[in-house]
Amino acid sequence: MSDDLFYLPVKIGDVELKNPFIVASGPTVKRTDQMELAEKCGWGAASIKQAFNPFPYINYQPRYRWLKKEKLHTFTAEYRLDYEAGLRLVEDAKKKIKDMVIFANYSYVEEGLEGWQKSAKGFEAAGADILELNFCCPNMSFNVDVHSQPSEGERPSSGASMGQDADAVRDVVKATREVTDLPIIAKITPEGGEIAKVAKAAYDAGANAVCGVANRLGIAPVDIWNYKRSIYPLQGENTMGCLSGPWLLPLALRDVYEIRNLNGPEPHVIGTGGIARWQDAVQMIMCGADTIGVCTKTMTSGYGFLEKWMKSIKDYMEKMGFKSARDMRDLLLKEIATAADLTVWAGYAQVDPEKCNACGLCVEVGQCNAIILTDAAAEISAELCQGCHTCIDICPKNAIDMVDEKAAE
Ligand SMILES: Cc1cc2nc3c(=O)[nH]c(=O)nc-3n(C[C@H](O)[C@H](O)[C@H](O)COP(=O)(O)O)c2cc1C
């Protein structure tokens, strides 16, 4: 391993990233100065804010909410680049960035494939290292679709509506492959429940990588006393929110796991969604990701945390005997058992009367009839205990633990 802290190389097609960390497309990659800072902080790649061709139909100033308690970021109206602005950004960034790989993240939002091809050629000429085709944005036609079934003649399918359709993704990737030799990433969506099959269509058509996932469309928490007004500070109306951040991680891990399982060890997978700690990135790699996209965490914390992450990951790798990111990849594929294959262990919970303060919280557990409260402490009947673990999780005194009968044998 090189002494350079940030060196943990990985390739997408022929293009080498110095490490697997990508500033995922979003508001922290819409200006060159942001990308210069990201490069200084050691990031392997940055994917520019989505550029639209033709001009986007929802394009307001951004209004964001970061709900710390819920670990959830939400927004609807997001500033976007038009195609020309996207080209200029890539051109300018390429003049100033030496070491960091630049992805052009874009969509074409009218019917037909020629527009996609023209965009690909334009971004290649502008100097993009890699093309990232956006089949994931929930805030394009998908936002409209979930309110009402699209009728004939309405806006063409785009973003997350298009990304559910394996044939449409295949056609666009194939048409793009015909006009460029640059590596192609298809950034796809779990909406529709077929993400692994859509990934396969993209790889079959010539994509070098698939990225899952982007934001999920949902209804962000509302203020029930002012339910006619949005929780967005600047936005008066209620809308569906594009949700991202740590709450998304378990779902994103599953999506990457499914993509890797169906498509085998060869193709490149970019795991994105909810990565907010170095340990999240390691789990994502273990579920099958080669590289890691991070957006929300860069919005709330900038780019500088990567140094700590790299130190921690390198320490971890040394302790675990991993020499490359590839050594960690897929480790969970064999470990995750189906529900049918799981071993069911016998056991029960027991109270440590020294620690218990008889607060009675555990007696309230709705599914349990095994716990009674005496004046001094809670008592658990081993016979009635179903081993659900809820009392252990809610006990404020950490006074309960499990007796594993197999281990005790
Ligand atoms: C405000 C905002 C804007 C985004 N814009 C884009 C975009 O233009 N293109 C894109 O492919 N993804 C976009 N994303 C999705 C992110 O790149 C990422 O896939 C998603 O937020 C999940 O990752 P995270 O939990 O690390 O944020 C955006 C996300 C946010 C929060």
Image (cartoon, rainbow, N blue to C red):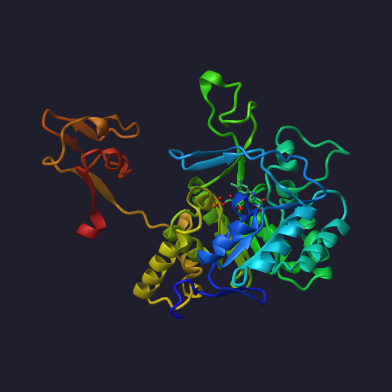
x 42%, y 76%: residue: 322
| Left or right of 299, for residue 26 | right
Q: x, y (%) of residue 113? A: 86, 57
Q: Nearer the viewer, residue 31 or 51?
A: 31
x 77%, y 63%: residue: 123
Q: x, y (%) of residue 111? A: 87, 50
Q: Nearer the viewer, residue 404 or 42?
A: 42
Which quarter of the rendered picture does the C terminus lie within? Answer: bottom left
Quarter-of-image position of residue 383: top left
Which quarter of the rendered picture does the N terminus lie within? Answer: bottom left
Q: Nearer the viewer, residue 63 or 262?
A: 63
Q: x, y (%) of residue 73? A: 53, 42
Report if residue 402 is visible in the image. yes
From the viewer's perspective, is residue 383 above or below residue 53?
Answer: above
| Left or right of 349, for residue 342 | right
Report if residue 22 is visible in the image. no
Quarter-of-image position of residue 114: bottom right
Quarter-of-image position of residue 394: top left
Count all numbered tags in the image, as a single digit.
0
